[in-house]
Image (spheres, helix red, strand yellow):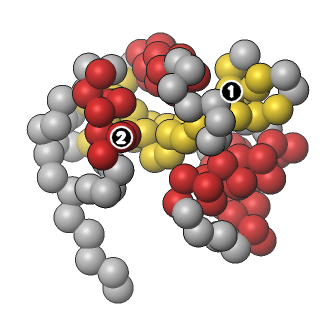
Amino acid sequence: MIRAGTVDDCFEVYSIICEIEDYALSYDIFKRLYKKIIASDSYKVLVYVDDKQIVGVITLRLEWQLHHCAKIAEIIECAVKKGYRSGGKGSLLFEFACKLAKNQNCFQVEVASNCKRIRAHKFYKKLGINKTHYKFCKPI
């Protein structure tokens, strides 16, 4: 089952994000940001629940962009817990997020993915996302 994320889901979502990042983020900061995000109209957090356990999450940022003259849905996080991957849950989350974006009058769905995440790149290509941009980052 896919549903909107709630405050009570915070730790399970945190655990999945830390797993995909392969790094333990600060839970205190994560919790504060998570609460802001789920309270905002500009973000949507969706969770995949399997047998009362959250096993996947996708976060969208919905924003107007001048260079498109349209509203865009950007996937900020998309992760499925180890042991539940390759079973279609990520695809279902993605399709649900696309329907939500369409209902929010978004022009398209975009995603940036770290260069090292080859498996994720194959996943997105399989879902019909085309590589049309480069993303550049500079730590400050």
Asked where in the image residue 36 lies, by quadrant, the reply is bottom right
- Residue name at image x 30 percent, y 46 percent: 118
- Residue name at image x 18 percent, y 29 percent: 130
| Relative to 41, residue 103 above or below | above
The tag on residue 119 is 2
Q: Nearer the viewer, residue 8 or 84?
A: 84
Nearer to us of marks 1 and 2 is 2
Q: Give how far across and how far down residue 42 sits, in percent.
A: 52, 41
- Residue name at image x 71 percent, y 54 percent: 15
Q: Secondary structure at mark 2?
A: helix
The tag on residue 48 is 1
Q: Give how far across and how far down residue 74 sits, in percent.
A: 38, 39
Q: Is residue 110 visible?
A: yes
- Earlier-in-chain disc, 1 versus 2: 1
Which residue sits furthest bottom? Answer: 140
Q: Give how far across and how far down residue 26 sits, in percent.
A: 70, 73
Would you say the residues marked 1 and 2 are in contact, meaning their CB atoms lie under 8 Å apart? no
